[in-house]
Image: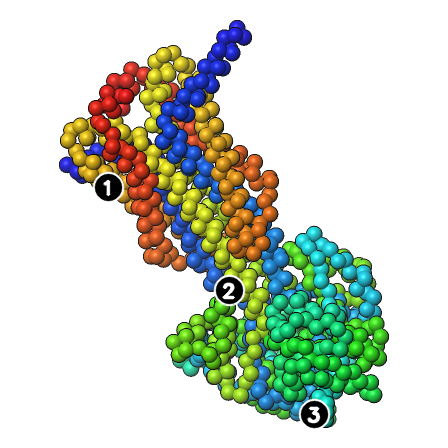
Amino acid sequence: MFLRLVADSFGRRPRHKLLTGAALALGMGVVTAALGVALDVGDRLAKEFRSLGANLVVTPTADSLPLEIGGVDYRPVNAGAYLPEADLPKLKTIFWHNNIMGFAPILEVRGEARPFVLNDSVHQPGNWVENVPIVGTWADHAVPLPEGGEFRTGVAKTNPWWQIAGRWFSEGAKECVVGAAFAKEHRVHIADSVSLASGDVTIIPAPLTVTGILASGGPEEASIVVPLSYAQSLARKPGEYRKLYVSALTKPEDAFARKDPKSMTPAEFDRWYCTPYISSIALQISEQLPGTDVRVIRRVAEGEGQILTHVVMLLWLVTLAAMLAAALAVGACSAASVIERQVEIGLMKALGAGSATVAFLLAAEQLLLAFVGGGIGYALGIVLARLVGERIFGAAPEPTLLVFLVVIGIAATVTLLGSAIPLRRASRIEPAPILRGE
Amino acid sequence: MTELRDTNRAMFWRILRRLLGANRGRMFVMLLALGAGAAVTAALLNLQVDAKRRLTTEFRAFGPNVVIVPKGSLSSSSATLSQSIIHSVPANVPSGRVTAMSALYMVASVSVPPPGKSASAVVAGIYPLAFITAYPSARPNQAAPSSENVCVAGVRFAKEVGVESHAELVVASGDRRESCRVASFRQTGGPEDNRLEIDLRAAQRLADLPDRVSMIELTVPGTPAEIQNYIADLQRRIPDAEVRPVRQFTEGEAKIYNRISGLLTATVGIVLLLTALCVMAAMTNVAIERRMDVGLMKAIGGATRRVVRLFLAEAALLGLAGGVIGAALGILLSIGLGKAVFGVAARPRLIVYPVAVGLTVLVAILSAFPLRRLASIRPASVFRGEA
């Protein structure tokens, strides 16, 4: 009988139920879409912030003080300490190895360069240019991973704002990339070649073919970028580098992250260690690479943390506001549907139904609507959240069970709360005056 | 004739008043739904306008984004600029003030007297030296130094030379020397960690380059496009120097700014659309319940057009009331939200208010339109209780 009453209520007023359901579905669609975007946005934006490049820099502990002006180190090659390149794959073995988006070792040498400008398909040798900064690094280097496979990384990941006209050099080939300022001054173009030497000019190595012109907006534009192994042979420092840039996905620092790890209790330390804060990733890297100083590039890391925190908070508040509005509108809708049914309620009571039975019947109806409407709204919201995610980040957020449960829960709560107030009033109604139409 | 029209109009308003007053509960839920819609519309519209503007200020957390360097400085780093060039830099842009920092770099020998360690290090003359505030990421341990014989030591420099806080340092270049007292330490992860920063005038005396600087760093607020325009404009004003963006930050910012503002627009758009539809569905639901009222009016001779007009007027009034209250609440809400997120209250935009109220009235009227279907109602069947 109970089920029949519910079914009858739906069958008798299909348009009415359809509209209540539509309101519910749309409201829950808002909730799902906003929640889906807000849950996902932190990770996505953190990835976007990697377009600012490296946020950690690794240097040897034993290094002498760099004499760096405008990005050019004035120390002689034999001063200071170096780090072994062979240790680098260990970076992908730290606890947060999946958060290491890229890294690139740097070895700078000052040397002489002699451009060969291509003229009528003949390379015309130019004059030797002295004191040219030569930067050795990885462009697209395959780092073997301990568990097998490889990780491709290089300076394009840590310095994404470097623009290359042409292409990067390939590792192992006799190729190089020339800074835009150097190229302009010495009229070097792509497909020309450059001879490099350092120290002893009597042994002139085979020239490198220029594959690209680098525009970075910084001092690198005056230099020549070569594969790391080539710079190592120029500097006579085989298998070594001087500076390592690491780009890591991090969680914005909060009050807990700023605590001194040394003063933490073991439980706190574990929690800190297992959270991808920039400081804990720095510690993990220095554990893997002995003899290094891992420093946070504060300008990048803190600016990122601040903006990320604010944007995520903003979206959460927008989500909350949207949820509130949807809840109010849906609640009002259910309230209205109960108010309009006073005659029906009066009739049921006149036929001997108790207030509890009536309330239970109406609640069952509302819940049924909430589940159907909430389910449709969830599907609608997921589609919209995907659309937003794909349009803006090029990747759709994963639908999660949590959002589904939250949405169904909100739908049920809101419809029940919305109908509870008029129901209470209805339960106090005397059936007779209602049935007489008063 | 005029009299009849007046009576008609008086009657119209009277019926309207009664319609509204007849069922307080129903009026309340309609107002609630419309008001909630209006509040969220106003709050999101206001916040969206404000947040985009605020974001550009947020990006200044990255510090300087434009540098002025001598022409051809890339091939010879000893080139310098005249300090007076800073007077040609426009100090105000639409989004706020430009802050500038001049620097002169040199390699000098630094020692801690009495005959302490001596080391060769990069010494940067900085004006204003209190520019620590321009790099909010640097955490000065003490208040910013202001007087001429104070210096700020980078952490690696301090470790290497063995400098303690408040230590007296002697900086020497050739036969010229200056002394200064360490006021604070800096840790930025950048080249600043390796150097000693002293007052610009002291550095100019040391290098014997009066009124010359190596570089001027500017922090320009604004959207990426505004910054591009600023750079182009500045380059025209000072043709002897080179103005270049700090690409790492200007490009990253442009990308991130576009993403965030796109995200905000999309989220706000979807939320607004769905909220409008949701409110509309709720209102329509209420409206189609009113067969009895329509039936009665038709039975006593109301023309369909007049009846529909009555209900539309009722909906518009409710929309107006809900919109006026809701939008005001929404703007208050957005002020609070702005304060919670950015620490600064969002500036209320007056244009948002009429837009939100107008949208609410529109939604209310649209949702009353299904009543036109009631034109086909036969009064008799309504009264007999037939559905």
The three-letter amino acid code for the residue at tag 2 is Ala
Q: Are marks 1 and 2 in contact (CB under 8 Å)?
A: no
The three-letter amino acid code for the residue at tag 1 is Ala
Q: Which residue sits at x=62%, y=82%? A: B156
User: In this image, B319 relative to B158: left or right?
Assistant: left
**Cα separation between marks 3 and 1:** 86 Å
Q: Which residue sits at x=46%, y=79%? A: A263
- Position of residue B378 measured from the top left corner of the image (x, y, whole percent): 32, 17
Callout 2: 10 Å neighbours few (<14), some, many (20+)?
some
| Residue B116 badge | 3
Compare residues B91 and A164 and report the one nearer the observer: B91
- Position of residue A198 measured from the top left corner of the image (x, y, whole percent): 70, 88
Place residue B211 in its image quadrant.
Answer: bottom right
**Which residue corresponds to mark 1?**
A364
Q: Is residue B201 visible?
A: yes
Q: Chain of mark 2?
A: A
**Cα separation between marks 2 and 3:** 46 Å
